[in-house]
Amino acid sequence: MNINITGKDLKATEAIKDYIEKKMSRLNKYYENEELTVQAMIKIERELQIAEISFSNKGESFRAVAENKDLYASIDEDIDILERQVRKSKTKKERMNKDDSIKMQATSLEEKNEIQDEVIKTTYYEIKPMAVEDAKLKLQERPGANFLAYIDIDTNKVNVIYRLKDGKNFGVAVPEA
């Protein structure tokens, strides 16, 4: 663990650095096998001694500022604040990972249970008697539709007019009997 201490109106002694390092070791359980660089600033304002400790890891920044009449109490309070922040962040990440894995399992179950060769949707529509040209105009009015069923006024049978893949021409399905 690398600790950089700056002091303002207060000298950063080796004892203070050792104390911060000892207290920051509480955070090692959250960051095993990772080298942390910690910035600490200590200063005196009136009769209060202020300790500000911050560090960042993998894009996450943690910062705590505490003031007390005793510098060591300020450092202790900072460490408690940082530990709460780190624990909250880790718990949030674990919960998100757990939720993501549950979603992945649900998705894979849905894929396994995917319905095949079944009629899964029924659409009702009105069939009107009309000529082939009227049916073509009606189909052109609906750009999202690919076909239109209608009753041919000449044969009185149900026919289907549909768009061909070229998007410009049409085909008509006529029953034989």
Image: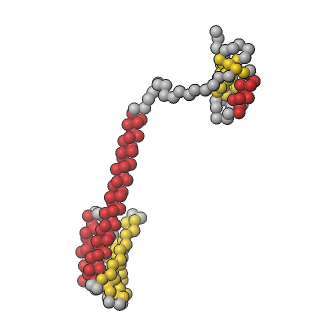
Quadrant placement of the N terminus: bottom left
Res 30 → quadrant: bottom left
Quadrant placement of the C terminus: top right
Residue 169 showing in the rendered view:
no
The residue lying toward the viewer, choosing from 13 and 62, is 62
Residue 17 vertical position relative to residue 9 in the rendered view, above or below: above
Provide residue 108's location: percent of width, then percent of height: 39, 38
Residue at horizontal 67 percent and vertical 15 percent from the top = 157
The residue lying toward the viewer, choosing from 15 and 68, is 68
Total number of numbered discs in the rendering:
0
Farthest residue in the top direction?
A: 177
Residue 124 vertical position relative to residue 55 in the rendered view, above or below: above
Horizontal side of 120 relative to 69 (left or right) equals right
Provide residue 49's location: percent of width, then percent of height: 32, 85
Residue at horizontal 29 percent and vertical 75 percent from the top = 77
Horizontal side of 31 relative to 126 (left or right) equals left
Provide residue 155's location: percent of width, then percent of height: 71, 13
The residue lying toward the viewer, choosing from 151 and 19, is 151
Farthest residue in the right direction?
A: 133
